[in-house]
Image (cartoon, rainbow, N blue to C red):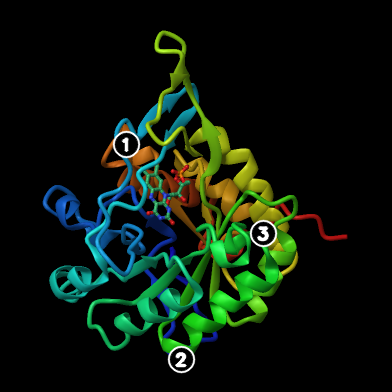
Amino acid sequence: MDLTVNLAPHHKMELRLRNPIMTASGTFSNGIEMSRHHDVEALGAIVSKGTTLRPRRGNDTPRTVETPAGMINSIGFQNIGIGALVREIAPIWARWSVPAIVNIMGETLQEYGTLAQRLEGVEGVAGIEVNISCPNVAAGGLEFGQDPRQAAAVVREVAAHSSLPMLVKLTPSVSDIRPIAVAVAEAGAQALTVSNTIPAIAIDVKKRRPVLANVFGGLSGPAVKPVTLRNVYLAAGVVDIPIIASGGAMSGTDVVEFVMAGATAVQIGTASFLDPAAPWRILDEFTRWCEAEGVASVEEIRGVARRRD
Ligand SMILES: Cc1cc2nc3c(=O)[nH]c(=O)nc-3n(C[C@H](O)[C@H](O)[C@H](O)COP(=O)(O)O)c2cc1C
């Protein structure tokens, strides 16, 4: 059985994964802690915590809350900053065979370019995942990822400063993900990550106020799976580049569903909060499903659930 997938088939560096199971940004730190307990190199790829130009403390606590079918988080991009990531983390990744992808988030268009530039030629970094779910004040407070032109501008800015394969992580907070997917693909992205958390809130009735210090957060986990599936399905209908599903995968069967909707790879996020070994369990379940069904490759089932009319 061949579970390998390529997230950048048309890029000179390619981005080959030994299997389609990836970690989701912000749910796996930078992989160092987990590598002490599990075989990180057995996964398809790992994705770093969202990394900004300068280190960030993140939002005040509480910043996570469990919901009936998932969780809401408002971590606020707590991270060590691009400088420390390049100095301290990348050299460790360089010793691993698993591709490490750096998730970046800029506060301005220029910051995205600077972040990409800082990763140029850094050993241990196999690709960039560009999170375009950040509010862009210059454009009137809309998220970069909610406007096709703004989204395309970010992609071009990163491409102008980087020779690495680029994944672009879209927001589900749009009425139709397709125009954004097309704009981002045409601007030069190698793959799309579909998608990020869904804006949400939880209220504490005893305290008579929102649970999260930041009031709002992003919903993830099983609750968002059908939404993610739809967005993967829609995006797969309009672009030819690989799609990485992110949102609600808890089992090997969930992975099968995402692949059948058109995904090439699947990220595991919230599942790791329930069980830190979730990425490996899900990989095992997916592999067994393929074996039991006589499926010899991911490509064989990719998009099979899509209408062909
Ligand atoms: C605690 C937490 C922190 C996250 N941090 C980031 C981040 O820094 N950058 C990013 O692009 N996505 C971030 N995400 C979103 C996840 O990468 C993922 O896209 C989302 O949670 C949906 O997948 P899931 O349902 O499997 O968790 C975060 C999610 C959680 C739960």
Rate crowding at label 2 as few (under 14), some (14 to 19) or many (20 or more) other CA atoms within 10 Å: few
In the image, 202 versus 165, the foreground residue is 202
In the image, 154 versus 7, the foreground residue is 154
Kind of residue indicated by mark 1: Phe
Residue 192: x percent and y percent? 56, 66
Please say whether residue 201 is visible from this viewpoint: yes
Q: Which residue is mark 1?
A: 273
Q: Residue at (57%, 38%) from the top-left corner? A: 224
Q: Is mark 1 within 8 Å of ligand 1?
A: yes
Q: Earlier in the sequence, mark 2 or mark 1?
A: 2
Image quadrant where residue 213 sits: top left
> Gap in Å between the C-alphas at discs 3 and 2?
25 Å
Number of numbered callouts drawn = 3
Image quadrant where residue 107 sits: bottom left
Residue 282: x percent and y percent? 39, 44
Is 71 located above or below residue 284 in the figure? above
Q: Residue at (46%, 32%) from the top-left corner? A: 215
Q: Earlier in the sequence, mark 1 or mark 3?
A: 1
Residue 231: x percent and y percent? 66, 52
Local secondary structure at mark 3: loop
Is 173 located above or below residue 192 in the figure? above
Is 287 located above or below residue 128 in the figure? above
Q: Residue at (63%, 47%) from the top-left corner? A: 229
Q: Which residue is mark 2?
A: 12
Local secondary structure at mark 1: helix
